[in-house]
Image (cartoon, rainbow, N blue to C red):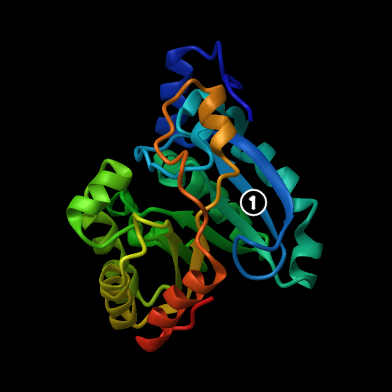
Amino acid sequence: MRVDLGKGLPETDLRSALATGDMGFLHSFTTGSTLDGPGVRVVAWTTGCMWRCRYCHNPDTWTMRNGIPVSVDRALQQLGKYRQGLKVMGGGLTVSGGEPLMQRRFVVKLLQGARAMGIHTTIETNGYLGAELSDADLDSLDLVMLGIKAWGEERHRELTGREPGPTLEFARRLAALGKPAWIRFVLVPGLTDDPGEIAAIARFAAGLGNVQRVEVLPFHQMGRYKWHKLGMRYALEAVEPPTPEAAEQACAIFRDAGLVAA
């Protein structure tokens, strides 16, 4: 867990960085990931998130000041070291978080720079701030990994603290633009495992026409210690991960809707 990495940064510098996008705040930088998009990838984990998901396993990324200030030029310089390897391994750059669109100007510049180097670009997002991106901004993306947490508005607010409408509207916009998308769905026993809710998400995703695959992510407890260390109340102490059979049943619902799911 990493906290207070940006502690001491003047508020004016923080505001300036967000306004220009010349500097961003990264929680960490991972190489060799095979779980965050196609191929082997470099992942830039941004800080800052407007949602408060009850099952979040990285609550230390919620606050922008938990990130290290990094210039776009410096980040691209580091990324360039892996350029050839990423191409050989069919991978690329994924920007995740936190919620990357909290730092959308920095993220777009980072993605545009990666694209200019011929590197495949992906963003993992909840899409809530997707309306802030222009169509030109979206041109810098090869793939969007979009998290859909729940279908019903009440359940969605219970899980995340926010309404689902902006995420679904962003999904429709990506479809209209023909932008390739993967849907990510976290399966939490007792919270997101209602077959009717899953089927509603499946029908929505299948109707978009641009969803290449669905990833059903079984809930786990690997982030519980972070909630404890941060002194935050963790509401899912007693929740067990779903069984492999339950995860497969959820995948089957998406497949029945005509989607590729795993």
> Residue 205 occupies which quadrant of the picture?
bottom left
Could you tell me residue 211's position as x and y percent? Answer: 41, 77
Which image quadrant: the N terminus?
Answer: top right
Which residue in the structure is indicated by mark 1?
A: 43
Rendered residue at 59%/65% (across/down)? 37
Q: Could you tell me residue 185's position as x and y percent?
A: 43, 63
Find residue 138 and report its horizontal and vertical position in percent: 41, 61
x, y (%) of residue 250?
43, 73
Residue 131 lies left or right of residue 81; in this view the side is: left
Which image quadrant for residue 67? top right
Amino acid marked by disc 1: Val
Relative to 208, is 242 above or below?
above
Which secondary structure, mark 1?
strand
Quadrant showing the C terminus: bottom right
- Residue at 33% x, 82% y: name it: 206
Residue depicted at 53% across the width and 65% down the height: 243
Q: Which is more toward the observer, 131 or 153?
A: 153
Where residue 137 sits, quadrant-wise, is bottom left
Point 47% across, 38% down: residue: 237
Is 69 on the left or on the right of 19, as rendered? Answer: right
Q: Nearer the viewer, residue 39 or 24?
A: 39
Above or below for 37 versus 8: below
Instruction: Depth check: give the residue in front, 260 or 209.
Output: 260
